């Protein structure tokens, strides 16, 4: 099942030991499993997927925070090294994730925004990946 609207072209689903990554034409969507301690090993897998699918084009990442898990915020320094990653959208209505978002945004230091639904997150990502020309 697609995590985001069917108007986006699903290319591949990766079922990994820590969760699932759905790859679309210019966005990757991640859902981390409950109870995971998300760390450098996991971010390395995500970076490898990004390098396979987005090595020559801009993309965004949507993190669907459906489950409870721990995230080492230092992983964001590795994501900053992906020049084609134009922004990260976090989707959650959980109060704890909203608090954690501020910390994560500090560590990432690039475009990152919190959303309550995946449709809004998808629209934002499309806007930063494919900005409209201003005349």
Image (spheres, grey):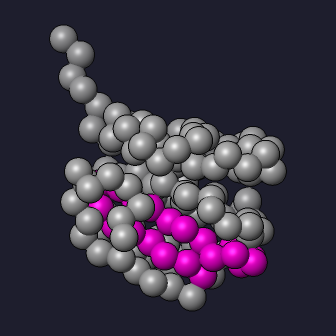
Residue 84 in the image, given as x and y percentages of width and height? 37, 53
Horizontal side, residue 76 vs residue 53: left or right: right
Asked which quadrant contains residue 72, the reply is bottom right
Front-most of 90 and 120? 120
Observer able to see residue 133:
yes
Taking the image as shown, residue 26 lies to the left or right of residue 28, namely left
Tag count in the figure?
A: 0
Q: Nearer the viewer, residue 85 or 102?
A: 102
Decide whether residue 105 is among the magenta residues: no
Question: Where is residue 58 drawn, in percent x and y?
Answer: 31, 50
Give the residue at x 36% y 76%: 13
For residue 128, above or below residue 31: above
| 109 to the left or right of 55 | right
Q: Nearer the viewer, residue 62 or 59?
A: 62
Q: Is residue 68 above or below residue 34?
A: above
Image quarter of residue 56: bottom left
Is 130 rendered above or below residue 41? above
Q: Position of residue 126 (x, y in %)?
A: 33, 41
Identify the image quadrant of the N terminus: bottom left
Residue drawn where x is 26% and y is 56% of the image: 6
Expressed as whole percent of the image width and height from the top left, the position of residue 81 reads: 51, 58
Residue drawn at x 62%, y 59% as measured from the top left: 65
Q: Write the start and end of the magenta stretch as one range.
A: 18-39
Kindly identify the residue that appears in the image at 55 percent across and 58 percent down. 64
């Amino acid at each position: 099942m697609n995590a985001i609207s069917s108007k986006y072209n699903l290319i591949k689903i990766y079922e990994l030991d820590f969760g699932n990554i759905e790859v679309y034409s210019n966005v990757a969507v991640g859902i981390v499993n409950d109870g995971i301690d998300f760390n450098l090993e996991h971010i390395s897998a995500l970076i490898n997927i990004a390098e396979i699918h987005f090595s020559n084009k801009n993309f965004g990442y949507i993190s669907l925070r459906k489950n409870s898990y721990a995230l080492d915020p230092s992983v964001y320094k590795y994501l900053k090294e992906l020049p084609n990653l134009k922004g990260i959208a976090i989707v959650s209505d959980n109060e704890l994730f909203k608090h954690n978002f501020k910390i994560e945004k500090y560590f990432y230091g690039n475009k990152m925004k919190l959303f309550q639904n995946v449709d809004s997150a998808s629209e934002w990502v499309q806007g930063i990946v494919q900005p409209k020309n201003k005349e």
